[in-house]
Amino acid sequence: MKIVTVVGARPQFVKAAPMSRALRPRHHEILVHTGQHYDDNMSASFFRDLDIPEPDIDLGAGSGSHAEQTARMLTGIEQILLSEKPDWLLVYGDTNSTVAGALAAAKVHVPVAHVEAGLRSFNRRMPEEINRVVTDHLSALLLCPSEVAARNLAAEGITSGVEIVGDIMADTLLGAAARADQSEILARHGLEPRAYYLATVHRPENTDAPVRLAAIMSAFADLGRPILFPTHPRTQKALAAQGIEVPGNVRVCDPLGYLDMVRAMRDAAAILTDSGGMQKEAYWLSVPCVTLRDETEWVETIETGWNVLVGADSRRIAEAAAEPPRPAARPTLYAGDGRAASRIAAALEAA
């Protein structure tokens, strides 16, 4: 079986690593990197840390508006599909790379398999929500991380080709957590385990809204511990453009490689983030999460009490971080058992 896999952003590299290992012994995988994330810290370091095969094709799409970026990807992916004539196109998550791959494949009649199908924030102002919905409605095989995701699809009339396979990010995280002590990220920044917060802010709803970004920085200033803040290029530009000062207790650094990030997550007192993937990773690592958004796709982490939504409200952020949630129970979520990749491979073979 020939499979074209499209990736382009850090979370997709994490998911592609175990999937490539599951597919390549028996199938021909062509790995296409759109170039959505393209500098070393956002891309190449992940391929090294995760031992992902070098991309067979790099489209070099780069940055730009959503339309510009997606158009460049569409053109490149279509040419690859017409040339390679694969049995499947495999996409992950909810980025512009995801929807570009799905659209290109649908137009040339290559069936689409979508890993992380069925996630919904129910906020159509989020570009990621549009990408998810469109990709799901174009997909022939919808690989869901949870029962909730499958129910979301059923509510939209999608019941054919739906498989609950668990969450593939757990496959990678479990292996990396066992090696995390090799990372020297804490020593490099003078941090002690459980004595600091880890923060990430990258979503346009926060970075492109001066009032929200300023409120988040204000909340960070009120926290009594140092904050390690790996800063997305978009966030660096927004802070500078908006003239927002970073508080003195915040230790800004470039985006981290995967192993460094796992160590930083694992040993934090709490994680403050607007990332979707980090909400799950925090849960699996038993680290409280304070989510800097008004809604989340990962509602189960809220329901179990390990995650709290605070938006960009300075008071709520500071209060939640000062007393982060740490319930006594932590039920298994998203079949985080490290076997999602093998289930996905089996579903592709059976389809």
Image: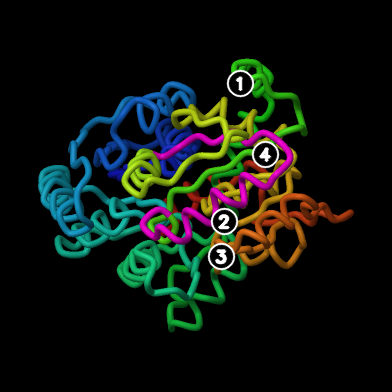
**C-alpha gap between disc 1 and disc 3:** 30 Å
Q: What quarter of the picture does the N terminus occupy?
A: top left
* Along the viewing direction, whichever of 186 and 61 lies nearer the viewer: 186
Which residue does the numbered mark 4 point to in the structure image? Answer: 197
SS category of the residue bearing label 3: loop
Q: Earlier in the sequence, mark 2 or mark 1?
A: 2
Q: Which of marks 2 and 4 is nearer the N terminus?
A: 2
**C-alpha gap between disc 3 and disc 2:** 20 Å
Q: What quarter of the picture does the C terminus occupy?
A: bottom left
Which residue does the numbered mark 3 point to in the structure image? Answer: 296
Q: In this view, does 325 lie above or below 232?
A: below
**C-alpha gap between disc 4 and disc 3:** 21 Å
- Taking 31 as reference, is 273 left or right? right
Q: Earlier in the sequence, mark 4 or mark 3?
A: 4
**C-alpha gap between disc 2 and disc 1:** 38 Å
* Numbered disc in front, either 4 or 3: 4
User: Where residue 16 appears, x then y in whole percent?
Assistant: 43, 39
Which stretch appears magenta?
A: 207-232
Q: Indicate yes or no whether the magenta region holds residue 211.
A: yes
SS category of the residue bearing label 4: strand
SS category of the residue bearing label 1: loop
Q: Which of marks 3 and 2 is nearer the N terminus?
A: 2
Which residue does the numbered mark 2 point to in the structure image? Answer: 165
